[in-house]
Amino acid sequence: MKHKEATLRTKQAMASSMKKLACQKPFAKITVSDIITDCDINRKTFYYHFGDIYALLRWTLEQEAIEVVKHYDLLAEYEEAVSFVLDYVDENAQFIRNVYHSLGQNELKRFFYCDFISVVRAFVDETEQAQNLSVPNDFKEFICSIYAEAFAGSVLERVDHPENYDRKKIMKYTSIILYSAIPNALRTAANLTD
C-alpha cells in the first residue's frame, strides 16, 4: 500500500472514531486517548497527522463535505452541490449537533465559515469570468464574507432547528441568491468607479 493511501486510511479511521464518540458523549469530553483506543492506533500516530482534536474535526468536515462541494461546477451544478450539503447535514445531524452543543454556535460557525468562504469565492470568480466582468477584489472579498457567514449560519440553524426547514424552499432561495443576488451585485460593483 502506498504511503499516501495508508495516511488517508489512518486519518479516516480517526475521523470515524471521533464521529462515533461524538454521538455518544459531548465533543468537549472526547480525548485523544479515546480516539486512539477506539481505532487502535498509538498516540504518536495521532499527533503525526493532527495537532489536536480540533484539527481532526476540521479535516473531517473538509474531507467529507467541503472538498466534495468544491468539485462541483457551481454555475451548472449548484442544485447537486446544495443537495449534497443538505444530505450531509441530515446524515450527520447527531454528530454535528453534539459538536455544536459542545463548542457553541460561534466556534462551529467559524469552522464552516472558513470552508464556505472558499466555495463562495469559487462561485464569485466563475460568475465574474462567465459575465466578462472586472470586479474590484475588495468587493469580491466583501461579498464572499457576507455569503459565507450567511451559509454557515443557515447550516447551523438547520442542525439546531431541523423542524423549521423545508428542503424545497432552501433550494429555491439558494437559487435566487446564486443566480440573481450575487451576479447583480457583481455587475453593479464592476460598473462603479471610486
Image (cartoon, rainbow, N blue to C red):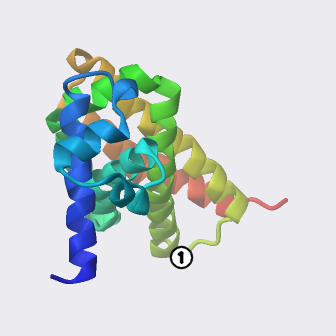
**x and y, in percent, of residue 186 in the image:** 58, 58
SS assignment at label 1: loop
Look at 24% across and 23% down and name the residue there.
Answer: 165
Point out the residue furthest to the right here: 194
Q: Is residue 103 left or right of residue 61?
A: right
Q: Please name the amino acid that badge 1 sits on.
A: Asn
Where is residue 53 drawn, in percent x and y?
A: 41, 43
Above or below, 136 against 130 in this view is: above
Which residue, as the protein is rendered here, is positioned at the far bottom?
2
Report the number of discs: 1
Q: Report whether 114 appears left or right of 192.
A: left
Relative height, residue 175 to residue 80 (above, below): above
Front one among 180 and 168: 168
Q: Quadrant of the C terminus?
A: bottom right
Q: Quadrant of the N terminus?
A: bottom left
Q: Nearer the viewer, residue 164 or 186?
A: 164
**Can you say whether 126 is above or below 35 in the image?**
below
Please determine whether, in this image, residue 73 is positioned above or below residue 85.
below
Residue at left offset 48%, top offset 58%: 118
Please tell me in which quadrant of the rendered image residue 166 appears: top left
The residue tagged 1 is: 132
User: Which residue appears at 29% of the width and 68% of the height?
Assistant: 71
Q: Residues within 10 Å of mark 1 (few under 14, many from 20)?
A: few
**Image coords of residue 59 (percent x, y):** 37, 54
In the depicted view, which residue is nearer to us: 125 or 134?
125
Q: Is residue 85 visible?
A: no
x then y, percent, for residue 38: 18, 42
Residue 74 appears in the figure:
yes
